[in-house]
Amino acid sequence: EDQVTQSPEALRLQEGESSSLNCSYTVSGLRGLFWYRQDPGKGPEFLFTLYSAGEEKEKERLKATLTKKESFLHITAPKPEDSATYLCAVQARGAQKLVFGQGTRLTINP
Amino acid sequence: KAGVTQTPRYLIKTRGQQVTLSCSPISGHRSVSWYQQTPGQGLQFLFEYFSETQRNKGNFPGRFSGRQFSNSRSEMNVSTLELGDSALYLCASSSATGVETQYFGPGTRLLVL
């Protein structure tokens, strides 16, 4: 069964303090790994799609990387507006559904 | 391009009632997926529709059903509501032509009393 585990569950940082969020996965043939950001009371907002090990993508202060067993979301010099829950999801080959992790709740203090 | 829209945004029902939620995908997107989000279980896949046909189904009871219309708009229905059905119901659309990103709507918050 496809499975995604995210750590830590919650992370509190000071503004400007860089860190990384982890997403470990097991999937029967990876079609794609997705990162989303979710603010309270809203739907997930798409950030990145990664397709194969070694791939990296960047957007502003965020950088996502992928290995054969895990993905990292690196946050560089975060700002309070980066506070949100970050969700990781995998899609298996031949499947349409996304399997989500429980998310990491990130809080950036000014 | 307009995003995924869902109506209503909030809903309060009582046990035993039924409810219908609506989703309009991004223009040009033909695949619509539905997810249930709860604090305990996180985001779980309900089902996916493409060209008016259900292609994939998650592990939910038959009380949960859906359909898709020729304009790709989709509805999901939950019959005989239970307290445990209280959740945020999210709709996501994609063009479904390969490894395509699913874009989510704002969700419908359902509270069952």
Image (cartoon, coloured by chain):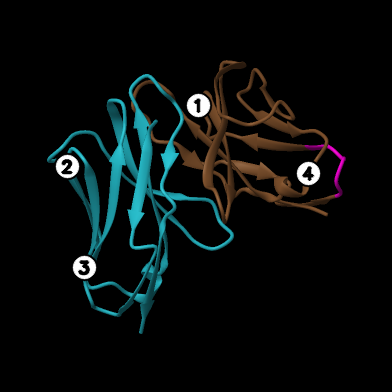
Chain colours: A cyan, B brown
Residue B64 found in image quarter: top right
Q: Chain of mark 1?
A: B
- Name the residue carrying label 4: B82
How many tags in the picture?
Answer: 4
Query: Of the residues shown, which amino acid type is indicated by label 2?
Result: Thr
Query: Of the residues shown, which amino acid type is indicated by label 4?
Result: Glu
Q: Are marks 1 and 2 on the same chain?
A: no
**Outermost residue toward the bottom?**
A110
Mark 2 vs mark 3, foreground winner is: 2
Query: Of the residues shown, which amino acid type is indicated by label 3?
Result: Thr
Residue B5 found in image quarter: top right
- Name the residue carrying label 3: A76
Alpha carbons under labels 4 and 3: distance apart: 44 Å
Mark 2 in CB contact with mark 3 (< 8 angstroms):
no
- Name the residue carrying label 2: A67
Q: Establish if B82 lies above or below A92.
A: below
* Image spot of residue B60 (x, y percent): 63, 31
